[in-house]
């Protein structure tokens, strides 16, 4: 229950897909019942130019990110390389959880089951166990965003893992319970990786704010701008200024606009007997 957003955009020199902007809330759902704003961000720095954003089970998601961070070699890894590491670790941890939840209580493990034991079990039992494995949801989604020598990149890793999804062509993506609200907002801005940096920053901020109407999305906000020089995190002062701009942007319909709409005389024309057949 959260919102995590990533968007690619131009740098200050107008070079497309050179910068990645990421944003998330801090809402945590505990035990599937209790929700609270946590002081720990959902955005993890894997390197000085690459981050992960986690939606879903916070403990499992943070474990994936921490272990990938620990395994990432020093130097300048590519964003895709980190995304593949995230996906591979996702697969491994999901498999361990399947062993723990499904096979350990039966005194076997997943390797024994698929190594020949499956064929010796009763058909319905083997089929039921195989179905549980296939449908097992690890309950975590991740975005991987950042920059490398080839520009900015954005990937998602979803259950059950496997090949990461590349969003470079589209230029944005979101995960979490507020995903649809955020994506609809970004689409409404017509965002692409060619958009200027500060235009894109406002687009991402608005998307996060609009996602707050979804269940489980918190009000606290973290936003980072990732360039070839590293990550810049927005301060509380930056966020307050963005909030003011957003509130001005969301202001009620002005008197002038209302007057222009009223000039259409839609209902008056109906009262005067003008033809008002339904559209075909």
Image (cartoon, rainbow, N blue to C red):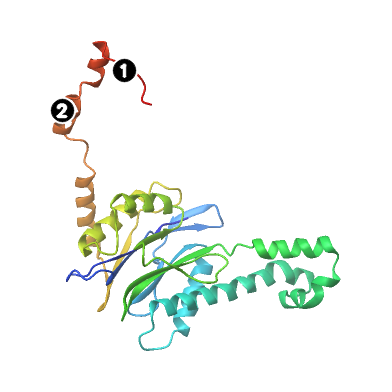
Residue 259 got which mark?
Answer: 2
- Disc tally is 2
Residue for point 60% across, 62% down: 137
**Residue 41, x across and y down, in percent:** 39, 66
Work out whether mark 1 precedes mark 2 in sequence or the reverse, and give the earlier one.
2
Which residue is most to the front? 280
Q: Position of residue 23 (x, y in %)?
A: 34, 62
Q: Going by the picture, which residue comes out furthest to the left?
A: 256
Cα distance in 3D space between marks 1 and 2? 23 Å
Q: Viewer-nearest of labels 1 and 2?
A: 1
Q: Secondary structure at mark 1?
A: loop
Q: What's the residue at 39%, 54% (across, down)? A: 218
- Where is mark 1, residue-wise? 276
Report the quarter where the C terminus lies.
top left
Q: Residue at x 86, y 65 (%)?
A: 122
Residue 254: % across, % down:
17, 35
């Amino acid at each position: 229950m959260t919102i995590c957003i990533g968007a690619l955009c131009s740098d200050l020199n107008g070079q497309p897909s050179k910068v990645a902007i990421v944003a998330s809330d801090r809402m945590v759902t505990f035990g599937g019942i209790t929700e609270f704003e946590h002081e720990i961000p959902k955005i993890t720095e894997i390197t000085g130019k690459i981050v992960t954003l986690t939606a879903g089970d916070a403990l499992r998601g943070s474990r994936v990110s921490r272990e990938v961070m620990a395994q990432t070699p020093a130097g300048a890894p590519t964003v895709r390389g980190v995304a593949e590491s995230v996906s591979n670790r996702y697969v491994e941890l999901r498999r361990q959880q399947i062993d723990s939840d499904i096979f350990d209580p039966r005194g076997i493990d997943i390797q024994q089951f698929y190594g020949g034991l499956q064929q010796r079990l009763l058909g319905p039992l083997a089929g039921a166990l195989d179905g549980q494995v296939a449908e097992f949801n690890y309950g975590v989604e991740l975005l991987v965003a950042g920059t490398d020598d080839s520009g900015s990149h954005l990937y998602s890793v979803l259950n059950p893992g496997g090949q990461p999804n590349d969003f470079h062509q589209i230029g944005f993506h979101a995960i979490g319970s507020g995903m649809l609200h955020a994506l609809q907002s970004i689409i409404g801005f017509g965002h692409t990786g060619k958009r200027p940096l500060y235009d894109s920053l406002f687009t991402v901020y608005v998307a996060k704010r609009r996602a707050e109407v979804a269940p489980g999305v918190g009000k606290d906000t973290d936003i980072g701008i990732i360039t070839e020089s590293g990550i810049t995190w927005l301060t509380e002062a930056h966020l307050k200024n963005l909030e003011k701009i957003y509130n001005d942007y969301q202001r009620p319909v002005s008197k002038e606009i209302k007057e222009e709409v009223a000039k259409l005389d839609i209902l008056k024309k109906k009262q005067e007997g003008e033809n008002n057949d339904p559209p075909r």
